[in-house]
Image (spheres, rainbow, N blue to C red):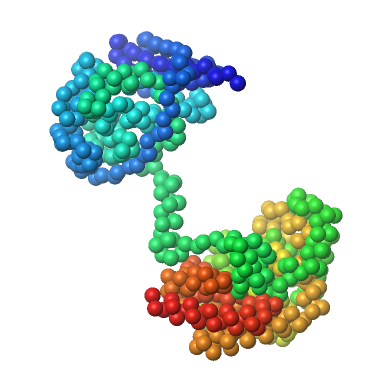
Amino acid sequence: MAEESIYSLKMRAEANGRHISGAEKILPETAVGDFARALLERAMHHANGRPDFVNLKIEKLPADKVLDLEALPVRTVEVSSPGQGRGVMTKLLEDSGVANAAVIVDMLYRTSGMRGAILLDADTLERLEPDHQRGVRATLMDDAESACKGANSCKEHYAEAIVLATKVAHAPGMTAELCISDDPDYTTGYIASRKLGYVRITRLKSPGSPQGGRIFLCRTKEAPAERIIDYLERAPVRVTGVQPLRREGVFDKTGFVNGALESLKRGNLFRDELIFDSAAAPCVELGGRGTLLLSSNDYLDLARDERVVRAAKDALEKFGLGSGGSRLTTGSTVLHRELEHELAGFKETEDALVFNTGFAANSGIIPALCPPEGVIFSDELNHASIIDGCRAAKARTVIYRHCDMHDLAEKVRTIAPRQGGLIVSDAVFSMDGDIAPLPDILDTAQEFGLFTMLDEAHSTGVIGKTGHGIREHFSESRHPDILMGTLSKALGAEGGFVCCTAEMRRFLYHRCRSFIFSTSLPAAVMAGALAALEIIESEPERVRALRGNVKFFIAELAKHGIQCVSDSAIVPIHIGDEEKAASAAVRLRTRGIVIPAIRYPTVKRGEARLRAALMATHTHEQLAFAARIISQSLRETKKI
Ligand SMILES: *Cc1c(COP(=O)(O)O)cnc(C)c1O
């Protein structure tokens, strides 16, 4: 392909012989027309006034002479007074090996009114510009991405400053450039060099001051003045990677993100992402190494069960991957409804409704169910998705002490909500593995006509004699209004669900925003979950094996002096300090065991822990090994 010709465009506008605006571009031939118009537009409508003379010069450049330079990195130094700003600039100059720094910075304030810059020898302080009135100007430069940014970018003065400083910094013999705008409203100036980068210094002068100027500080020891001037005025330069500068007082996006990351690291709250090469089974491939996993919520090891996989595969072939629409439009299949009927049967309710995730279910149901005048009573250790649901609801949320039924009853009686409301609780708490006192919750709710909602994410397939969950665990015949659960834990699939009356299902179907405005799950996921549900029913020994494993593991830990309690598949090992918990988890991982450290904000500050999650298919040998390694790692961690 033939090289495209490159052109220089220069615009200069005057009124009554006085300069009012100027700009220049270096562009491929195809962009010349658009930019010529944009520059004329800028000339004719400049804030400095209407011109009576505009010069637009367009000139072809020898393509092999155009230099491509990378933009100087930009940083900003905030100062509180011009004196302090001057100090910063002087110090930076001194650090660059300039002897007369203070004198030179002083000169900067006395150069007002010059069109160009002073070209100053840093060693002799001799002024080298041929015309002291006019000064030296750097021209023939542009942002290399100009043509892509489009002709509108002609308004970006900030980018122009970086382009100029980058060209100047690369001049032969150049030590540094100092600049203060003579614009009375613009108090930020800069010092730039290849070594320092482009350092913006805020408040280099008092607001309203017309003082300003520019000094190119060079060393004729390194290059003769003529060569420096020739480069500045005649070498065409394109600058790549120009980022527009932030205006003062404008929100710092990068700082916002990086600041948050820094603070996570300082608080030992930064998480490494583990990347697995295999299914989340008791033994996994992690970074090419066999590792014992005590952390999956796939408690019954059904995600990779061949019957589950085959059912999903068959449905995948028949229905394809994505469902193509919300449940209210085209996203309902016979498999969605079949699963809902089976879930309802499993939980002994009239009907059920599948959501895309447990999170979506909780965050959508609570605002739908609780009117703005109502009150939500929520256990202090409820899952984040419940907390988000409470936040999304306009109703008042009252937090009661964890599983404290006296506190709940007292709060309900004191507030005595008459306009509706809800008591909501995890059935099995996701961080401690303990169980909510369902019968008491139902008693209290009944008295005040409150809805009740239990989150069975960690109880389905785990508690109750045959894994049916919290009602089976308590042999409770009454039904909470909402038995919410997930397909994503013991069912080894993905998705949330609600088991309830047929009317409640219809109500939620029309009221839950997270249900309505989201594409439904693939039919293949429904088919897989259906197969998993069938297995839980037909092979209750899986639930028994899981419970047996928890007992065994807790007994093994106790042998090593580590006391834990759990009523479910979650075994929390309390540590407290975030750093110690994080370091224990790392030690375990280097010994081939994954047990995550759970830290704030998942649990309260100072309550960090290792959270082991057991599966029905862990062997006693694996669990005994894990208990031994945990005990070793904790002993080592305590020593640090
Ligand atoms: C995991 C979990 C959820 C969220 O379920 P997903 O299907 O993973 O979105 C909700 N509540 C509790 C208690 C959970 O542990």
- The spot of residue 564 in percent (x, y) is 54, 84
Q: Is residue 546 visible?
A: yes
- The spot of residue 102 in percent (x, y) is 15, 36
Tell me the quadrant of the picture where the N terminus can be found.
top right
Residue at 16% over, 24% down: 126
Query: Which of 68 and 42 lies nearest the eye of the viewer?
Result: 68
- The spot of residue 594 in percent (x, y) is 57, 71
**Quadrant hosting residue 475:** bottom right
Question: Vertically, is 401 above or below 192?
Answer: below
Residue at 61% over, 73% down: 292
Left or right: 24 with respect to 457? Answer: left
Tell me the quadrant of the picture where the C terminus can be found.
bottom left
Q: Is residue 424 visible?
A: no
Left or right: 365 with respect to 558? Answer: right
Query: Which of 240 and 384 lies nearest the eye of the viewer?
Result: 240
Left or right: 193 with respect to 350? Answer: left
Question: Vertically, is 242 above or below 514?
Answer: above
- The spot of residue 210 in percent (x, y) is 23, 28
**Quadrant hosting residue 358:** bottom right
